[in-house]
Amino acid sequence: MADKVTKRADDYSQWYLDIVQQAGLAENSDVRGCMVIKPHGYAIWEKMQRTLDRLFKDTGHVNAYFPLFIPKSFLAKEEEMAEGFAKECAVVTHYRLKKMEGRGLQVDPAAKLEEELIIRPTSETIIWNTYKNWIQSYRDLPLLINQWCNVVRWEMRTRLFLRTAEFLWQEGHTAHANQAEAQEEARKILEVYRSFAEDWMAMPVLTGPKSDGQKFPGAVYTLCIEAMMQDRKALQAGTSHFLGQNFAKAFDVKFQSQAGQLEYAWATSWGVSTRLVGGLIMTHSDDQGLVVPPRLAPLHVVIVPIFRKPEEKQAVLAAAQKLAAAVRDIPRDPYFDYEPLTAKVDDREQYQPGYKFNEWEVKGVPIRVELGPKDLAQNACVLARRDLPGKEAKIMGVPLDAAPAKIVAMLKEMQTALFERARKFRDENTMEVNSYDEFKKKLEEPGGFLLAHWDGTRETEDKISADTKATIRCIPFNRAKETGKCILTGKPSEGRVVFAKAY
């Protein structure tokens, strides 16, 4: 049986790593800072990917693929981006190895590249250099492109899923004929991200712009979705950037307008990554292991047959397989994106039922079915919901014929309950503060989202961050109109912003 998961209250960081390991989600690779995503973890990412891909396509976007390698000169063309990513870039300088006498394989000094190549930390530069050839006229716009790929940012401190040197993501890059259309695109994608986070991940988020100190390098402004984890720290879960004409000017992307004038295109970029898997873990999981929202669960139902005598085996297994088939045959539901529900019969005889219960609990399968001879005699089964504790989780004596419909209802109830529980936790840990002393005190205990007045300057934001390690996470769209005084400088403030410590 797997080791017990460390309790959240004892060591939150270790609790998180225990779940990633024991639920079979990922592990550290032999390449420093990189991870191996294991099948169960990758299956969750695939569910996220399929859902987001449909949402992008439903809003008119199409997929393409661009090179992993970016000439160094491309990055240098947009100064703010070059400065923002310089310290994280992995650089390819040679293109060949050579076997040297007594020294084994070595970099061949004669194979030095004329220009170094950057392994993409993000793709704005290579894509806008390409768009120069694609965009000639207003008729070529808008250009709504997304790509699914990996990127490399040479992080010094890494944590599985949350921050790794290489990670998987999607990055959208769009070109538009005017500013208003590009800004509308940035807001549209933010709404796609909000909907995915809340409706599919059951993870409540704040939406709004970042401060200038937290925006994406090269953007005019950055919009974000920001979530609260169970340790009350913030997680930036997705960003959508209005890039203005910065990249069009850097790469000379002009088009002929309807009026016959040459104009620079307007741009957006936006992305979410495998960091979302980490967000899912830290939003919902408990001291027993992983909890997966049903709409993103790779496996919805596990059926554990229970028998002791050989003569009981055949009937119990047959009933279990029949129930699994009935679950799979449930008419496809838009709630689950028209994907069939998945069910598995755990018929491994080398493990006792208690071991199986624990294993599937740690892996976060939403519904567990227990089926033994006594249940079969009553033509019934036991259903257990993963997100509820102890005896509260179980429903006894569910008729086998009614079980599939009951399972669907339980999955939907669980999805809603997870969101409401997470929203309640966030709201209970969001508070207004009106002085710097109060800010510092509440930041340490209990922590959470602190709504504070700020004078709008980068200097003040940097001072607060250096002093407390808290940053402005979001300037919420729905914040109340309220003038006040900055908690640090006492200068006028147009409204409260959200400060928090963050991942």
Image (cartoon, helix red, strand yellow):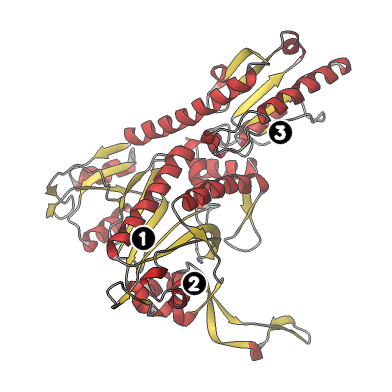
Q: Earlier in the sequence, mark 3 or mark 2?
A: 3
- Does the residue at mark 3 contact the one at mark 2 (Cβ under 8 Å)? no
The amino acid at mark 3 is Met
Residue at the far right in the pictured view: 310
Q: Position of residue 180 (x, y in %)?
A: 28, 60
Mark drawn on residue 89: 2
The amino acid at mark 2 is Cys
Mark drawn on residue 1: 3
The amino acid at mark 1 is His
Q: Nearer the viewer, residue 337 or 215?
A: 337
* SS at circle 1: strand
Q: CA distance from mark 3 to mark 2?
A: 42 Å
Q: Is residue 228 above or below residue 379?
A: below
Pointer 3: residues within 10 angstroms few (<14), some, or many (20+)? few
Q: Position of residue 63 (x, y in %)?
A: 53, 60
Q: CA distance from mark 1 to mark 2?
A: 21 Å
Q: Residue drawn at (36%, 57%), measured in percent from left and top? A: 185
* SS at circle 3: loop
